[in-house]
Image (cartoon, rainbow, N blue to C red):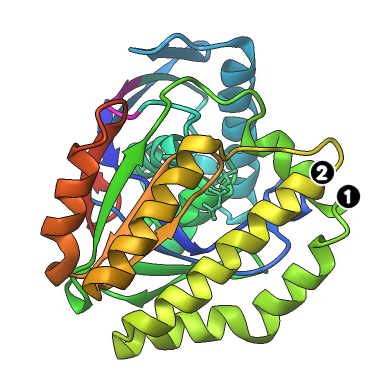
Amino acid sequence: MTTAASAPNIALIKYWGNSNDDLRVPAAGSVSMTLDSPTVSISVEHTDELIVESDKKLTPTDLGRFEKTLENIKHYLILEGLETTLPGYVKISVDSKIPAGIGLASSAAVFSALAKAISLLVDTELTDEQIATMARLGSGSAARSIYDGFVALDADGTTRQVAPMDHWKLHDIIIAPDIDHKKVGSTEGHRLAHTSPAFDARIKAIEEYRVQECEDAITQKDFEKLMRVSEEDCEDMHCVMQTQNPPLQYLNDETHRLIRELKSLRADKHLPLLCTMDAGPTVHVICEEEAVEAVKNYAHAQEECTVFEAQVGKGSYSA
Ligand code: PMV
């Protein structure tokens, strides 16, 4: 039996829409920061049939996703010439500290931990790039959680590190107004992203300048630049979501109130903080050290919200 652990990542330039839905090849590049918490731990062992055990209730859709991901991983290992190392069937045991479906990238943590645990089970040493590809087959964004620090997932489905975790000690104070599971998951959402009239223009903007600006901001530790490009892209992704068919509205009134108040805190106190949301109402407040105390004070004063405190993290690891 092998065990691996992983944490979510927060996208600064976001992945929304695929060029190949089955293999989760993204329609454009994305860039993220790997977090250090909350974590998921996954154990895998050889068995005679696929078994998935979890501390959370699994739906038939969840089970189907594990099954399909394992099938795709097996095909991938064959393509890589590693068929002798294939797991026949595996038992997967999931222990997650992350509420699912609220925009906290629980699937990124789950599938990056699963890919890492499988890589430890097969008897050949796999590269991070190969492990990231296996993770991507379960959840596109999971590929980015294999690496520490700041990570890019390119439009051809390959991943690369933009900067290691000790390059820039950013924090992510996560404010979740609602821990109920969202109705439409991102797998389904990605499939219909192209039906939005705003989809093509967003892909073009990402390709033409957003990924580059984001990477430059990270390399130069230019928070102002990071804030501008990541908030622009977040707004644009939610515009695509809200105009695709059928529309997806992940943000709620609480999300908008939190963003409004955080932006006025930023303006009043000149704080280096930015707000970004994935596929849920949860607000991620990314900030530099000098803003972290004010952001934590604000977050913990939101009585109805659940708060998670994370920092840039080390990526998936053997546990
Ligand atoms: O990896 P998925 O299928 O859960 O998609 C993630 C989509 C977003 O979280 C909204 C954006 C991103 O890049 O993480």
Q: Which mark is residue 195?
A: 1
Seen from the viewer's position, the closer of residues 284 and 291 is: 291
Percent across and percent down for residue 175 are 33, 41
136 in magenta: no
Residue 208 visible from this viewpoint:
yes
Residue plotted at (80% across, 72% down) = 201
Residue 74 occupies quadrant: top right
Vertical side of 33 occupied by 92: above or below: above
Looking at the image, residue 251 sits to the left or right of residue 204; the answer is left
What is the number of the mark on residue 233?
none
* Circles 2 and 1: CB atoms closer than 8 Å: yes
Does the segment drawn in magenta span residue 96? yes
The amino acid type of the residue labelled 2 equals Leu
Graded by Cα atoms within 10 Å as few (under 14), some (14 to 19) or many (20 or more), the crowding at tag 2 reads: many
Viewed as shown, does residue 46 lie left or right of 164?
Answer: right
| Residue assigned mark 2 | 192
Q: Nearer the viewer, residue 142 or 248?
A: 248
- The quarter in which the C terminus is drawn is top left
